[in-house]
Image (spheres, rainbow, N blue to C red):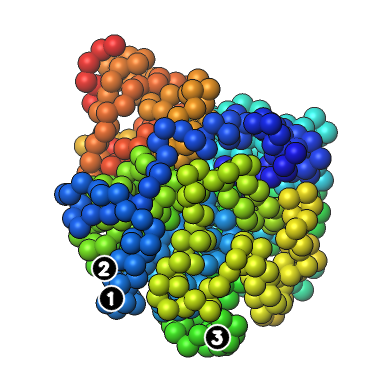
Amino acid sequence: MIKSVCGYCGVGCGVEYEENKLSGNASYPINRGSLCQKGASGLLSIHPQNRLTKPQIRENIEDDFIASTYEECIAAIAEKIKQTPKEKVAFYLSGQLLTEDYYIANKLGKGFIGTNNVDTNSRTCMSSAVVAHKKSIGADFVPLRMDDIFRANLLILAGANTAEAHVIFHNKIKKAKKQGLKVVVIDPRFTETAKSADIYLPIRAGSDIDFFNLISKRLIEEGLYDKEFVQNHINNFELLKNGLNELSSAEMLERTALCSEQFEEFFSLYKESQNIITAWTMGLNQSSQGVDKNLALINTHLLSGKIFKDGNGPLSLTGQPNAMGGREVGGLATMLAVHLGFDDESVKKVSNFWKSDKISNKAGLSATQMLEAELEVLIICHTDPIYHLPNRNKMEALMQKIPLVVEINAYENSQSAKFAHIRLPSAPWGEKEGTQTNLDRTITKQEKLGKTFQNIKADWEIFKLLAWELGYKKEFDYKNPKEIFEEYQEMTKLNSYMDICEASYDELSHKPFVWGEKIKNFLTPDKKGNLFFVQNKELSEKTTQEYPFVLLTGRTRDQWHSGTKSASVPSLLKYKELNFCEIHSADADMLGIKEGDEIRVASKRGSLITKALITECIREKTIFIPISNREVNYLTNDLLDKESFQPDYNHSAVKIERLYKK
């Protein structure tokens, strides 16, 4: 029997494989044998008909691809990189990569090619949380774990639909509810998660800062904050207090579209709860004020002292299986490896460790900035920017101008493929070995469940061969993922709070390692948490008479992003369709739309055809289209948060037109 870990969401469930059968690992602490539908179907996604099986190359994107070899393609990539200014080379990575893949790509790009343009699709999911954690807590560190809900009295879920995006964690929530946990769900949609909530608050999209500022303002005004904790452990209290004094509670409540009775019911429960956890994900992060939303939320925990204590704290829920592991090894253009920055001391540490003099002290381009930077070489690995970047028409026009686009992928049917000049097949989950870190800092090992399909290479091997072709054979002479992981472990010693060097690679598949368990205080230089006064600046796109609806986007339970893997599994198509649009019944009546009608949804940037799903479970003048609709980003706005560079996927102004009756 082979023990491994699921490669879908950030929960990171343990699995067992024996005789072509996949099941949950009953002894694994995260899931205790449970698996969601996606996880249980993992074997069916390894060898679908849409696998990319051979290297391909072409001169121009108008030409057909010609079958090639890894050697020929990698030589062509290396030659182009040698001829290109380093600031015009970029690596676009993914939370689907294992830590060893991420580490090699980051080391090659930043350490030896000399470009800090090494970023990830996690930029579009979690970067607002990363920035906020660093500003308030002192590091990209989640100060509690999923099982803390069993020691909490109240769980607040804001912009997080755990019943569909983090299924096994949601099962834990339901179990904790039976033991007395109260749950509040804050969301413009009455989601599957909201159905099991004790209190549901149908907040207006874009007003999260107002809601959390209301909590902080009341805590201060009523003297309910932890005065001793704030005095001894928190900075900027007076700054926050004075700022909130200038804000009108009535105006903030009005912007949330909640009535006073709804807020008072919530706040009574809040005051009665000794231990509180607030969890969130892309509903808050994906905003032109994503960082500020995170800071407003974290402020409530710093004021109340409900942090670094069992059953308390802000719990950021990552979406992808290794979004956190990628951040640990420096997979963001705004950081170096092991959570180090671009200050002189950090650059010196990393340069000495890698024995390189090529590291720049200037942050690189984020994934959301790359296509507008007139790149000459773009290497995309295990992700699909044309599918997932906002304002798709614009991104397509920009992508086709790049002289060399390289796609490293396990699957044939990506949306970015038609813009690529070289395509290199790589091993997916189940065919490769390495480690990943789940959303609460648990490091586990993915194991190979069988032979690699047609001798396809793992991502780390592809990056290693590219490094060799560029002349860095000695620096990248790795024989297996274990050697890479152990080098990375040594590197974590450069950062005093990362204790990953204590893990054992060989034991990780059956004995996961949780890093940072000894951290019980803030990681800022003065060991104090930082409050930040923020306010809702309403920076998102405004609705107009022509575009009167707000578009929300998000996952459905059984599909994974574009459906490259999951849409090929028949059992995963039964729960919800890939393409639909939730619309409130009052809005549908006004537009003459019936259930199942084909409708055109359009923004200033583009349009798509979808099918109406009429419901009472969404706010009026708000619609929802799942990201399993591959065309959804023809609609979305490319407004970015000014600090995290994360897109505003959840507040695009759109209009709706009925095409014809069913």
Indicate left or right for 522 with 455 as reference.
Answer: right
Identify the residue shown where x is 56% and y is 38%.
Answer: 165
**Along the polypeptide, which appears first: circle 3 or circle 2?**
3
- Identified by mark 2, the residue type is Glu
- According to the picture, the residue beneath numbered tag 1 turns out to be 84
Whole-Å distance between the Cαs marked 2 and 1? 7 Å
Residue at point 58% right, 87% down?
352
User: Regarding mark 3 in the picture, which secondary structure is present there?
Assistant: loop
In the rendered image of this protein, does residue 31 appear above or below residue 472? above
Task: Name the kind of residue labelled 3 in the image.
Answer: Lys
Mark 3, residue position:
355
Marks 3 and 1 sit apart, C-alpha to C-alpha, by: 23 Å
Of mark 3 and mark 1, the one earlier in the sequence is: 1
The residue indicated by pointer 2 is: 376
Q: Secondary structure at mark 1?
A: loop
Taking the spot 53% from the left edge, 22% from the top edge, the residue there is 571
Is residue 188 found left or right of 373 in the rendered image? right
- Above or below for 267 versus 482: above
CB atoms at circles 2 and 1 under 8 Å apart? yes
Left or right of 437 on screen, residue 543: left
**In the image, what residue type sits under mark 1?**
Thr
Q: Position of residue 84 (x, y in %)?
A: 28, 76
- Label 3: few (<14), some or many (≥20) within 10 Å? few
Could you tell me if the residues under marks 3 and 2 are in contact, i.e. CB atoms within 8 Å? no
Q: Quarter of the image containing the C terminus?
A: top left
Q: Would residue 324 be visible to someone looking at this image? A: no
Q: Is residue 510 above or below residue 566?
A: below
